[in-house]
Image: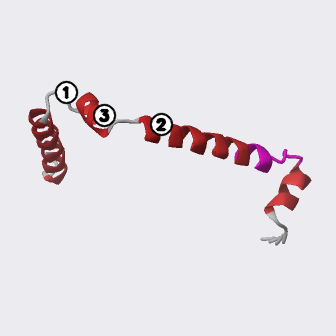
C-alpha cells in the first residue's frame, strides 16, 4: 500500500509549523555586514601586493604553478593502471 500526501504551503508556513525560528532578518544583517567588510578590503587591497603574496618568486612562481596544474590535468587523463 502506498499513501501520498501533498502539502501546499510556503517556506515561512512550514518553518512556523515545525517550530523553526525565523532567521531572515539575521541573515540579511549578516550578508550586509559581510558585503561591507568585503568592499572595505577590496578598496584597500593592492593587486600587486596580493600577487607577491601568492607568487613570491614572480613569473618563475607563475610558471611553476602552471606546470603543477598541467601535471594534475595530465594525471587525470591517464588511464587507470590495473
Residue beneath the point at 78% across and 71% down: 2
Q: Which residue is mark 1?
A: 56
Earlier along the polypeptide chain: callout 2 or callout 1? 2
Foreground disc of the pair 2, 1: 2
Please give left or right for residue 31 compared with residue 41 in the image.
Answer: right
Residue 71: in magenta span: no
Residue 21: in magenta span: yes
Quadrant of the image occupied by residue 12:
bottom right
Residue 6 in percent (x, y) is at: 82, 72
Q: Which residue is mark 2?
A: 41
How far apart are the two marked residues, 1 and 3, measured between alpha carbons?
10 Å
Q: Magenta residues, as a range?
A: 19-27
Mark 3, residues whose alpha carbon is within 10 Å: few (<14), some, or many (≥20)? few
Q: Quadrant of the C terminus?
A: top left
Please give left or right for residue 79 compared with residue 48 in the image.
Answer: left
Mark 1, residues whose alpha carbon is within 10 Å: few (<14), some, or many (≥20)? few
Q: Quadrant of the N terminus?
A: bottom right
Whether the residues at callouts 2 and 3 have beta carbons within 8 Å, the answer is no
Residue beneath the point at 87% across and 60% down: 13
How far apart are the two marked residues, 2 and 3, measured between alpha carbons?
12 Å
Depth check: give the residue in front, 9 or 63.
63
Earlier along the polypeptide chain: callout 1 or callout 3? 3
Please give left or right for residue 30 compared with residue 74 in the image.
Answer: right
Residue 73 in percent (x, y) is at: 17, 49
Q: Which residue is mark 3?
A: 50
Residue at disc 3, secondary structure: helix
Amino acid at each position: 500500500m502506498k499513501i501520498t500526501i501533498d502539502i501546499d504551503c510556503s517556506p515561512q508556513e512550514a518553518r512556523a509549523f515545525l517550530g523553526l525560528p525565523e532567521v531572515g532578518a539575521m541573515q540579511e544583517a549578516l550578508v550586509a555586514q559581510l558585503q561591507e567588510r568585503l568592499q572595505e578590503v577590496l578598496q584597500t587591497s593592492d593587486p600587486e601586493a596580493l600577487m607577491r603574496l601568492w607568487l613570491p618568486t614572480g613569473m618563475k612562481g607563475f610558471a611553476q604553478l602552471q606546470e603543477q596544474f598541467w601535471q594534475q590535468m595530465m594525471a587525470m587523463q591517464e588511464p587507470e593502471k590495473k
